[in-house]
Image (cartoon, grey):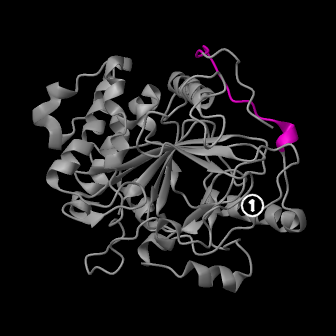
Amino acid sequence: MAIELNEEPTPMAHAKLPNSESARHDYGSAEKAMIEYRRIGTERAMKLGNRGPIRFTDEGKLHPQIAGSYSECGFYVFENVLKEQELTDIENDVAEILRRVPVSRDSKLDRFGRPALGSNCKARSISWVKPLSDPVGGTQAAHGRHPSQMLQLEPPSDAPKEIVQVISGALQFSEAYLRVYGHPDLLRVAAAIHGPDFTPFNEVLWIKHPGLGGSVAWHQDGWTHWTKPTLDENTHGFNFMAQLYGCDAENGLWVVPGSHRKGKADIKAMIEKEGSDRLPKAVPLICNPGDVVITNRQAIHGSFCNTSTKYRVTLNFGFHRRSSVLNVKSGGVHNPITTYTEDYIRSRSRMIMFGINARRKRYPDETPYEYAPLRDRASDYTWDSNRMAELTDYNLQDIGI
């Protein structure tokens, strides 16, 4: 069941992660209900009208149809954002990352005997999961925001004890990811929603292995501002989710449309009412390769075990409204607890500039985005690959709220 990548410890020209028909798993006694749940959810998702290319008005504003649909649903599928060459670059970097991960949770070496990915980092770089499990549901992890555990399945007899599921601080491990982070149209969307002084959140790489990937219990991402009188639908920011291979009802994220507008939900009570983890109003993200979803962090969302034959590889990166984070003391999930001062935010925002400049090198015919808060220091962020070492542990300055 392990990923069969080229045994040479050097990048390949093209390194597609293999799907496997033998990887398919089912939900046992719940399989019939899951099949119907996926079918209904997919039909509802495709009728929402919240998908299409990124569009702006002649004045440069986000198209009102997109803005309105995102506000109503809490997510929007931007279609065909990343083209074939960029997807190939990402795919090669992901394959190399998976060659470089430790052979086990406690190891400092990869399977070639080299220092493993993240072995020189102080910040956590890799999150492991028991195949087909839900490690955080029903626990106090992440401020207890996953109050109920998803249905867990028994993994195949030949499955590894643990698999890699999340790579944190992923910009330091992939120049292709860094270039996606500087995508001009995505940054224009961020500015349209949070203003031109928007700030970073964090960046992770999700890898849902076919027939093995664990679930993520239903939750809302934010924890800091739920009781504040200034709370609105955008207070806790959003995530972009760029899809390398696409995703569907079996291996993708599910979202409850409109739940981002209703404040803090009692998710445990919702699940107890249904008698299962199949929330009836949720819909799956249905994406093709290169689609990028914007998802409000306040929306109720989660994902089931990946019982399909297909990998789901998601480049997940988010942004905040500056007023939601400036001089706020928070953290403890994505970064150490700290106060997000102007200097702290400015330092963390350098990653936006590095992304913009790395992308400019790869796509010189694009018009790069101009990030207003660091416009006066643009010359400090000229990019070449030798600067990758400067990014080590940058995620110790993530901005979690």
Residue 263: x and y, percent? 42, 78
In reply to whether residue 285 is colored magenta, the answer given is no
Q: How many marks?
A: 1
Tell me which residue sits at (37%, 39%) in the image: 393
Evaluate whether residue 47 shows in this view: no
* 254, above or below 260, in the image: above
Tell me which residue sits at (21%, 39%) in the image: 371
Evaluate whether residue 48 shows in this view: yes
* 135, above or below 377, in the image: below
Residue 401 occupies which quadrant of the picture?
A: bottom left
Tell me which residue sits at (51%, 71%) in the image: 145
Residue located farthest toward the left when viewing the structure as drawn? 376
Residue 245: x and y, percent? 63, 36
Q: Main secondary structure of the magenta part?
A: loop
Task: Pick the quarter of the image with the N terminus.
Answer: top right
Residue 51: x and y, percent? 52, 51
Point out the stretch of residues depicted in magenta: 10-23
Residue 352 occupies which quadrant of the picture?
A: top left
Residue 254: x and y, percent? 61, 60
* 148, above or below 325, in the image: below
What amino acid is at disc 1?
Answer: Arg
Horizontal relation, residue 261 to residue 15: left or right: left
Other residues around mark 1 within 10 Å, as few (<14) / some (14–19) / many (≥20): some
Look at mark 1 in the image and give the residue it sits on: 38
